[in-house]
Image (cartoon, rainbow, N blue to C red):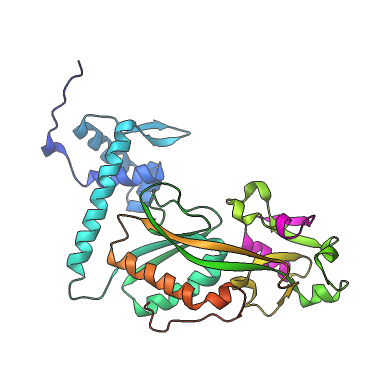
Amino acid sequence: MQKSIKLDLARLNWDDLRYFLEVARTQRASGAAKRLGVDYTTVARRVRALEDALGTLLFDKSRSGGFVLTAEGQRLLGYVDSIETTVQSATEQIANTGHALSGHVRVGSTEGFGCFFLAPQLARFQDAHPNITIDLLPVPHFVSLSKREADIAVTLERPEQGQYVYTKLCDYRLKLYATAGYLARHEPIASADDLRDHRFASYIDDLAFSYELLYLERAVPGAQSRWRSTSVIAQYFAALQGGALAILPCFMAAQDPRLVPVLPGEIEVTRAFYLSCREDLRKLKRITTVWDYLRAAAGSNRALLMGEDNAMAWNESGTP
């Protein structure tokens, strides 16, 4: 028969839950210490104190794997995560009564869209909402909402499982681009057959974080790619050197007069971006405000995103 453990709630320091939460998310005491602004020993001590108060082991610790949640730790994580969200919501509701909207929002995004579209749009947004702090994470990999790497994510694919709210943000188009100098040095390109001997900048197939990025072979069968990168921004700059063609998002390339579309209307790829966040965060005012603004910004820039215009549109008020 399993021995019953009586918890002494007087020994439970509620602040230790914050330390537990950060270690669970980073899987490193050092990473949690950096995010909390304390030293490593403080984090380790607080986690041990929480384990002692609860009478159970919350992490399996190893040099290679870091701090890995035990089954009991996984159960506790769900509760503590909910507590954090409830506290955030309550604090926001009380603190913002009669005051300007404030708080912190972290937005994760694919690299190109984050740098070329979201960065300028969110800069305008913050002009209208100076009390909302924005972190933008434009990265060439998936951002984890479950680990709170971001509050809102812009992704190439819909979240398949979990308690998330998502919507289609927009369609966007990619076209084949080259510099005018590159085109002047080569025979005229009249059809896709003429591309057979040209060089392309593209993704590294086995390192692409999404199948949606592997469009070169489908758009230009038999394309020769001798310059590859995990970064679409690197491909963009490679194309600007005039030594290769590249399939690039129109929201990047159409704004740059140095790049010219090649076989427009014939070689085009259409993809979509999805906007998502955790279900429990969606009701927070600051999250809703940024979410609605991004949807409005994408809607007003449909022509740029689809390669039908080369200028970005602005919502000068910074509101949806």
**How far across and down, in percent of the image, does residue 269 sit?**
65, 64
170 displayed left or right of 9: right
- Towards the viewer: 231 or 224: 224
> How many tags in the picture?
0
85 displayed left or right of 139: left
- Towards the viewer: 166 or 317: 166
Question: Where, by quadrant of the figure, is residue 304 drawn?
Answer: bottom right
Question: Where, by quadrant of the figure, is residue 47 drawn?
Answer: top left
Instruction: Answer whether residue 230 is visible to the viewer in this image.
Output: no
User: Seen from this angle, which residue lies furthest bottom?
Assistant: 316
Highlighted range, magenta: 217-240
| Magenta region includes residue 76 | no
**How far across and down, in percent of the image, does residue 38 sit?**
32, 50
- Towards the viewer: 147 or 319: 319
What residue is drawn where x is 29% and y is 48%?
A: 81
**How far across and down, in percent of the image, does residue 185 sit?**
86, 73
105 displayed left or right of 207: left
Instruction: Answer whether residue 65 is visible to the viewer in this image.
Output: yes
User: Seen from this angle, which residue lies furthest top?
Assistant: 1
What residue is drawn where x is 82% and y is 74%?
A: 183
Query: Which quadrant does the N terminus fall into?
Result: top left
User: Seen from this angle, which residue lies furthest right?
Assistant: 187
What residue is drawn where x is 39% and y is 35%?
A: 68
Residue 168's place in the image compared with 160, above or below, is: below
Residue 151's place in the image compared with 4, above or below, is: below
Query: Which quadrant does the C terminus fall into?
Result: bottom left
**How far across and down, in percent of the image, does residue 189 sit?**
83, 71
| Magenta region includes residue 227 | yes
